[in-house]
Amino acid sequence: MPQHLARFELSELTVPDAPRKPIKIAIPDVAFAFKSVDGKWARLADVVTTGKELNVLKHRFLDALRAYYQSSDIDDQQVKLCGQEYTLGRLEKPRHLCDW
């Protein structure tokens, strides 16, 4: 077995027994998104800066989304709440909705 495959973690490949309902994620129009930043570059930087509130909310949402598709530990409503929390955080109206 090649050396890289020997270290491959098979537990990462587990999937739920039943197919999961797809989660819809809106992809914004890039031109619209650029206009929406409207000088709020510091806020945008918070999304990608480790430890900042928006970055934490983003990763909580991504972790919930990953868990939704890899296990049955979380349902679609919990994922939506995490997404709403991240969205509200980006709109500078943070509320705690996600318990994931």
Image (cartoon, rainbow, N blue to C red):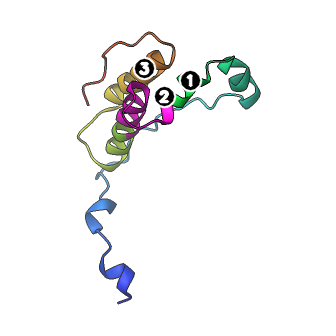
The three-letter amino acid code for the residue at tag 1 is: Ala
As helix, strand or loop, the secondary structure at mark 2 comes to: helix
Disc 1 designates what residue?
Answer: 42
Mark 3 or mark 2: name the one nearer the start of the chain: 2
- Where is residue 52 drawn, in percent x and y? 40, 29
Quote the CA–CA distance across marks 1 and 3. Answer: 21 Å
The three-letter amino acid code for the residue at tag 3 is: Gln
Give the vertical position of 27 relative to 6 (above or below): above
Q: Pointers 1 and 2 in contact (CB under 8 A)?
A: yes
The three-letter amino acid code for the residue at tag 2 is: Asp
- Where is residue 38 drawn, in percent x and y? 69, 16
Quote the CA–CA distance across marks 1 and 2. Answer: 6 Å
- Residue in front for this viewpoint, 15 or 36: 36
Disc 3 designates what residue?
Answer: 84
The residue located at (29%, 59%) in the rendering is: 14
Main secondary structure of the magenta stretch: helix
Quadrant in the picture for the C terminus: top left
Query: Residue 82 sits in which quadrant?
Result: top left
- Residue in front for this viewpoint, 47 or 60: 47
Mark 1 or mark 3: name the one nearer the start of the chain: 1
For the record, the magenta segment spans 46-62
Disc 2 designates what residue?
Answer: 46
- Where is residue 90 drawn, in percent x and y? 50, 19
Quadrant in the picture for the N terminus: bottom left
